[in-house]
Image (tube, rainbow, N blue to C red):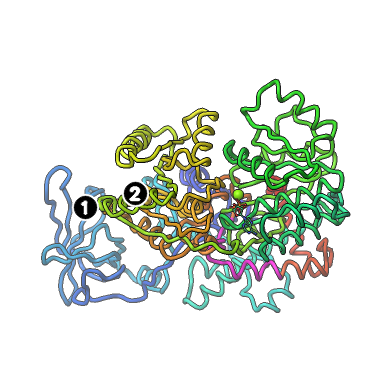
């Protein structure tokens, strides 16, 4: 069957609508339309009597006669009202827009099916901008048949009267023109085993459900199919890659690793750190290149795991590098690692944008000759003139801050692909990680070092500051340090910048007993670094900052973080910021300041923050509130695929199920060559022929 036909010839479409559909929704052929699924359904099987209606009811449907029209008000308050009556009472319909069109189109004494949301104004019950259909036999049958599908449309579409209703009518003519059953896209054995609804029925049901149960089964089938093909694609890609990409095997655990572990380590590793190190060890010892994501909440000790992995590389005669997203962080890693390594014979160097030219040349030389074992730095690491002798391991900290291109460029620094370890403190739910990162293996550090007291998170309105200030004075007296964070979402936003500077002056005057520092993104790197260093050394006791301090910075003596306008930050950002405290043995506090006016979402975010410290829980909540496209990290790498019906945020269980199913299928038939799997093979090719480039992730 040919579903690639253009839509121009479909009844109810025509050239101009076809054009809008193509431009606005990328729908160009019958098949695209068929797979444009409703986003919700509303039950219209019931017709209410007008006397039954009360304001506050959800969408309802009544059937009545228009008795009169009346235009009221002037200018912007101008509106058209109609009186609608049935045998139990009457109701007002109101339009603020399209008055002329409405008056021309709808007629007094005609009976209509009216759909909308009732509201009470004074003692008058009314429905604004209702859907109206002549109550003829056909409409009564179609519209009260049960669940009505609603389709997303754009502003442009609506302004050309191509709204959800219009799309629904187009769907009717689409199915009329396809007058044969749609061919199945999943193998019989799978349909039988999982008791799936056939494709033909599923597509019809999803657009025109006969009842809730059939709709559920139809959606289940379509989601499962979509996720199964996605997982098949991911797993096949991983299979192919692991066959192709030989890694550098790190065969031994050598002196540096052992000496570090037994002599240098100032504390014992947590169980989770040990487990993840074992996972890494098992991975790099083999022939296949490692591509591993380490997820660990802020403060879980990822740096140490990175360092010990780099020592594995060094002990096997390879170089390693660690790339951080900011200069502050690169410096801090460098200092930490130097300090931790003590006098072990491991050569470490730092390379950032501020490394002087005269220092670069010898550094490049030592790198090329292999004298240098570990290089730590920022993006500067991926510049062309940085050539390694034999790069065996790349560690990328806070990976979501790096663009795709930057990550893949590290690849070219070695003839064989180095092992890759990416670390993130923005935990992504497992189901999302295993889908989004394709074939990346995932390790999780799910345990904080012992002795930490959980951070207490408190919400205050920003006009209740006196108690807070008293508390801050007291903590300063006890020797603690404090972060105060201002939103500077867009570095270019003037008003934010002014708030920050005003805030700084204000804080300096209130806390005149201590030195106050400031960092923000507009500062030169050296200045920023200077300010950070002063805070790290305890010379400044309060640091007024923007989110530049968000990632990784470690000052164990800081025990309070105050976040101004907390409602303006996203959940994962708030969680990251909170992670700047609670790194020492003292009780730490995170104070979220907001104004009284809080949006519903803002309020929800604050509630979540004050109720849990668990990064995974927070990221789940974030995912549910914002949808996966908005999660930090996902945004920046972009979703490399497109789902039409499944939802990465809500269909976690189904994703896991599809994953297991895909594993099972590929285990038995890696290339999908069995005749029974022919539909899987062709479906996979059709869906993902060229589109996904998972390579970008590794
Ligand atoms: P993150 O995972 O956020 O990058 P870091 O690696 O910066 O965390 O570690 C946070 C702090 O915890 C550091 O000061 C580090 O030295 C310390 N730390 C790491 N591992 C342990 C451990 N096993 N026991 C005690 N402290 C640890
Ligand atoms: Mg870190």
**Which numbered disc flags the more N-terminal residue, 1 or 2?**
1
Nearer-the-camera pick, 389 or 138: 389
Neighbour tally class for label 1: few under 14, some 14-19, many 20 plus, Cα within 10 Å = some
Q: Quarter of the picture for ligand 1?
A: bottom right
Disc number lying in front (1 or 2):
2
> Mark 2 — residue?
473
| Observer able to see residue 687 | no
* Count of labels in the image: 2
Image position of 595 (left or right of 311) = left
Nearer-the-camera pick, 47 or 212: 212
Dot 2: what SS?
helix
Dot 1: what SS?
helix
Q: Quadrant of the N terminus?
A: bottom right
> Relative to 584, is 397 above or below?
above
Q: Are the residues tagged 1 and 2 within 8 Å (C-beta)?
A: no
> Residue at (24%, 57%) from the top-left corner?
106
| Residue ranking furthest to the top | 358
> Residue at (18%, 61%) from the top-left corner?
108
x, y (%) of residue 473? 34, 49
Residue 103, labelled with which disc?
Answer: 1
x, y (%) of residue 531? 49, 34
Image position of 371 (left or right of 450) = right
Image position of 440 (left or right of 520) = right
**Residue 659 colored in magenta in the image:** yes
> Residue at (38%, 62%) from the top-left corner?
607
| Residue ranking furthest to the front | 478
């Amino acid at each position: 069957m040919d579903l690639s036909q253009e839509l121009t010839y479909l009844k109810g479409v025509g050239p101009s609508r076809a054009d809008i559909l193509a431009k606005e929704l990328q729908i160009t052929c019958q098949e695209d339309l068929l797979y444009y699924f409703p986003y919700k359904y509303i039950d219209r099987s019931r017709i209410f009597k007008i006397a039954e209606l009360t304001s506050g009811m959800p969408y309802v449907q009544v059937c009545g006669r228009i008795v009169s029209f009346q235009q009221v008000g002037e200018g912007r308050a101008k509106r058209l009202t109609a009186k609608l009556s049935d045998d139990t009472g009457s109701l007002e319909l109101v339009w603020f827009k399209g008055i002329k069109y409405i008056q021309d189109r709808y007629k007094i004494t005609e009976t209509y099916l009216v759909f909308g949301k009732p509201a009470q104004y004074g003692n008058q019950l009314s429905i604004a901008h209702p859907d109206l259909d002549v109550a003829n036999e056909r409409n009564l049958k179609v519209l009260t048949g049960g669940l009505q599908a609603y389709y997303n449309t754009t502003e442009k579409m609506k302004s050309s009267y191509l709204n959800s209703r219009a799309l629904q009518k187009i769907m009717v003519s689409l199915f009329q023109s396809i007058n044969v059953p749609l061919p199945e896209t999943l193998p019989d054995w799978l349909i039988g085993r999982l008791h799936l609804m056939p494709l033909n029925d599923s597509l019809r049901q999803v657009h025109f459900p006969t009842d809730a149960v059939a709709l559920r089964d139809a959606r289940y089938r379509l989601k499962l199919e979509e996720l199964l093909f996605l997982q098949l694609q991911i797993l096949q890609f991983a299979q192919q890659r692991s066959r192709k990409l030989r890694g550098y095997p790190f065969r031994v655990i050598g002196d540096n690793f052992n000496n570090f572990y037994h002599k240098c380590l100032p504390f014992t590793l947590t169980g989770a750190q040990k487990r993840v190190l074992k996972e890494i060890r098992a991975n790099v010892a083999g022939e296949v290149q490692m591509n591993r994501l380490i997820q660990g909440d802020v403060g879980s000790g990822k740096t140490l795991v990175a360092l010990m992995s780099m020592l594995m590389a060094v002990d096997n005669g390879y170089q390693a590098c660690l790339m951080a997203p900011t200069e502050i962080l690169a410096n801090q890693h460098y200092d930490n690692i130097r300090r931790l390594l003590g006098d072990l014979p491991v050569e470490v160097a730092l390379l950032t944008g501020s490394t002087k030219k005269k220092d670069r040349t010898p550094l490049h030389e030592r790198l090329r000759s292999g004298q240098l074992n570990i290089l730590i730095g920022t993006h500067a690491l991926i510049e062309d003139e940085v050539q390694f002798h034999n790069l065996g391991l790349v560690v990328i900290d806070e990976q979501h801050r790096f663009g795709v291109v930057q990550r893949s460029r590290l690849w070219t620094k070695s003839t064989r692909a180095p092992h890759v370890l990416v670390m993130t403190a923005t935990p992504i739910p497992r189901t999302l990680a295993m889908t989004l990162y394709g074939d990346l293996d995932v390790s999780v550090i799910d345990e904080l070092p012992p002795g930490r007291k959980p951070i207490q998170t408190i919400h205050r309105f920003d006009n209740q500051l006196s108690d807070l200030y008293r508390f801050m004075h007291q903590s300063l007296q006890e020797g603690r340090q404090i972060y105060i964070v201002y939103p500077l979402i867009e570095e270019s936003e003037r008003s934010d910048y002014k708030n920050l500077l005003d805030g700084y002056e204000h804080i300096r005057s209130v806390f005149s007993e201590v030195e106050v520092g400031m960092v923000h993104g507009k500062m030169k790197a050296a200045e920023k670094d200077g300010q950070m260093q002063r805070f790290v050394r305890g010379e400044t006791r309060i640091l007024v900052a923007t989110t530049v301090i968000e990632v990784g910075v470690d000052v164990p003596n800081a025990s309070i973080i105050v976040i101004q306008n907390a409602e303006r930050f996203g959940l994962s950002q708030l969680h990251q910021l909170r992670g700047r405290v609670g790194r020492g043995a003292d009780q730490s506090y995170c104070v979220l300041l907001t104004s009284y006016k809080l949006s519903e979402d803002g309020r929800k975010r604050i509630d979540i923050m004050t109720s849990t410290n668990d990064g995974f829980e927070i990221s789940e909540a974030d995912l549910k509130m914002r949808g996966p496209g908005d999660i930090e990290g996902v945004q920046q790498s972009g979703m490399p695929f497109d789902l039409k019906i499944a939802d990465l945020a809500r269909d976690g269980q189904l994703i896991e199920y599809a994953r297991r199913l895909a594993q099972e299928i590929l285990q038995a038939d890696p290339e999908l060559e069995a005749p029974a799997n022919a539909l899987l093979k062709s479906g996979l090719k059709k869906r993902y022929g060229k589109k996904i480039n998972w390579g970008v992730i590794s």
